[in-house]
Image (tube, grey):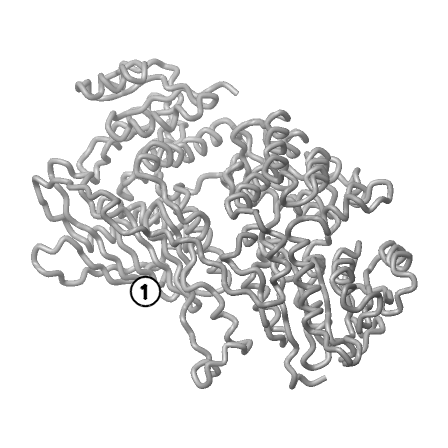
Amino acid sequence: MTPLKVIVCGSTFGQFWLAALARYPQRFTVAGLLAGGSARSRACAERHGIPLWTSPEALPDDIDIACVVLRASVLGGEGSALAQALMAKGIHVIQEQPLHHDEVAANLRCARRCGVHFRVGNLYPHLPAVRQFSDAARRLLRRQAPQYIDAACASQVAFPLIAMLEESLGALRPWQFAAAEQPPGAPWQTVQGSLAGIPLTLRVHNEVDPDDPDNHFQLLHQITLGFPAGRLSLTDTHGPVIWSPRLHVPQGVKQGRDFSGADAAHLLEETSAALGEPDCDSWRTALAERWPEAIAADLLALAESLQAPDAPAWQPQVLLARCQAWQALTQAIGYPRLVPGQAFRPLARTLLPETRRPEAPAAALPDFCARAETLIAGIGAQEVRAFVAAMDDACLDAMLFSLQEGGALLDPDRGWEPPALMAQLRVAAQHRPLIARWLALLADAGRLTLRGGCYFSAAPLARSDLDARWRAVHRAWDNRLGAAAFIDYLWDNARLLGPLMRGEQQAALLLFPEGRSDVAEAVYQHTITARYLNTLIGDWILDRLADGAPPLRVLEVGAGTGATTERVRELLRPRYGDAPPLAWTFSDVSNFFLINARRRYAGLEWISTALLDIDRPPQAQGIAPGSQDLLVMAGVLNNARDSEQTVRGLAQTLAPGGHMLVSEPTREHLEILISQAFMMPPPQDDRRRSGLRFLTVAQWWDLFRRAGLEVVASLPDEGHLLAPLGQRLFIVRRPPDAAL
């Protein structure tokens, strides 16, 4: 694709446009600068090594696009007149906001007469934090109608504010703005009204220094959307984005401090939570990186419309509505107050107290945890965090490499819609939801960019880079956190992701090569989390057993390779030998595991086996209601199609006062998404709607409570050194007074 020849008109803010063009040399060639010929513009042209022209008539005939970065007529400039003169020469134009409605209409008519394209550039809606806010707002709008808008901005950037709100709300009409009376000399003008029919309160910093009018504003943008369930806030144009659930205290909590009721589950939510990465860029990064990249989004969209006839059509009516809303708003605000001679006096960040929370200390652990804690002696928290970071990086690169290896996402200029990408990669139908989740994760991590429903990649990955990532994982694992065979297994999966996603390679054969179980044991039994959690399960049972009491009726669900069974047996043997007071049912959906279990536990009268499908009611499979004292489930519920339905069914098999011991992932385990996930059915519960493959701690608590169960404990807690690994043991009880 031949690069388009582009000129920039204006050397002040135009420098940001030059930086944007420089990011995509394969799409654009900077042909020169059109400016007044001042010392500043001459220096700018020299710095970029481009010609300087001082009149449109002097331009060469081969210019494709002109970026008009000059004030429009509505601000007393000549930007629109220049835009029309350039379009008359057959040059496509993209003009910097803001513009009056009449200017846009005139420019559009001129573009049609001259057979060229006209666009308006607006970087702010493309900034990462703004996109995150808009995406979150649209998701919330699908569930609840907003009740109010509370916003603030500088008058110079009121036009982008309108655009940002339109992107978030999907509409602007009807609108109404009225200025509130302000004290004389007040720097802020308050506007009351509505936008898209939603009540609006807007505070505008409406004063400027006439000698430096685009500076000295108190802020760019702040936006809060209020919903019945809480508030979504863009705290600054560059983030972070905060979700603050509404405080609503149920009657049971008000009257009796009962936090166990199902109607109190929402109180488990954090009082405020940052969406995505809460750490913000420096202003230097924002100006040098984020703004040029955001400007480039509009440039690339224009280039796409010129070079791809089937590109999505631009909708000028949306822009015209934004112009009209902005004009109505500026009319309500009135002229800014002139404050000449302003000076900026920065304050050092070090003057402020430390805002980062210290790492939470580990909570006091129950007595039965003592043995498990000895397993992690000598392992440091930083060591665990380093491994998690290395593993996540390796998995993300493996996902991207496999997509590129299949012939997609190799050209940074070509976007891929998911259906076309799936077809190119020949993804098997049953794996398409999984690959769709990969795409979302890669976009969240910045490996891909999502624009206009299409995914773009920055650059192809090399196999050598991928292998280097996995070597780093091996070093971080270092046999201290588990057997090396675990990393080898994941690396093998990473090398075979193409055949796996096409259905040409069976994932089970990588986990059980040649029918052996040594790899599966490394995965399910010999990692640090497996050893720790299985030890907790065994010692909890040991602590629970009382000499002389009837045998504890235990149903192990999804027992698989027997990793948990073996650890329980090992811990009970010193006290009870081979005859503990247990009636243990080893169950699984696969006869493969049951045959191995019957062979391994032959002669042990306390262990029996049973087929059990967690996606079917247990009662229909011979497990009577109230027949079990304890259910043990290690890493099985995430395989259920509907986790809540499965938990509800299994809960009915518990006697009143009976317990569940449930160990589960509580974060998006990328290593599972490139391996065992190919054997897991797509979820049909809340995970399908959210796109997540694994529930969070709060979601598990909520699920258990909706199933009528009480959460006794969740181990380890957030301050524990193993917490970053994202595995929890939930100790859950059926209330003693629960009806059978």
In the foreground, 555 or 336: 555
Relative vertical location of residue 105 with respect to residue 718 in this rendering, above or below: above
What's the amino acid at mark 1? Pro
Locate residue 177: give its quadrant.
bottom left
* Numbered label tally: 1
Q: Is residue 681 above or below residue 399?
A: below
Q: Quadrant of residue 654?
A: bottom right
Left or right side of 544 for 617: right
Q: Position of residue 511 (x, y in %)?
A: 78, 44
Q: Quadrant of residue 15?
A: top left
Label 1 belongs to which residue?
199
- Binning the other alpha carbons within 10 Å of mark 1 as few (below 14), some (14 to 19) or many (20 upward) gives some
Question: In terms of secondary structure, where does tag 1 sit?
Answer: strand
| 176 or 292: nearer the viewer | 292
Foreground of the two, 495 or 111: 495
Q: Position of residue 189 (x, y in %)?
A: 18, 56
- Compared across the picture, whether 739 is left or right of 155 comes to right
Is 659 placed above or below 227 here?
A: below
Question: How far across and how far down the image is residue 473, in percent?
Answer: 61, 37
Pinpoint residue 344: horizontal percent, then vertical percent: 15, 40
Residue at x 72%, y 66% (from the top left corner): 632
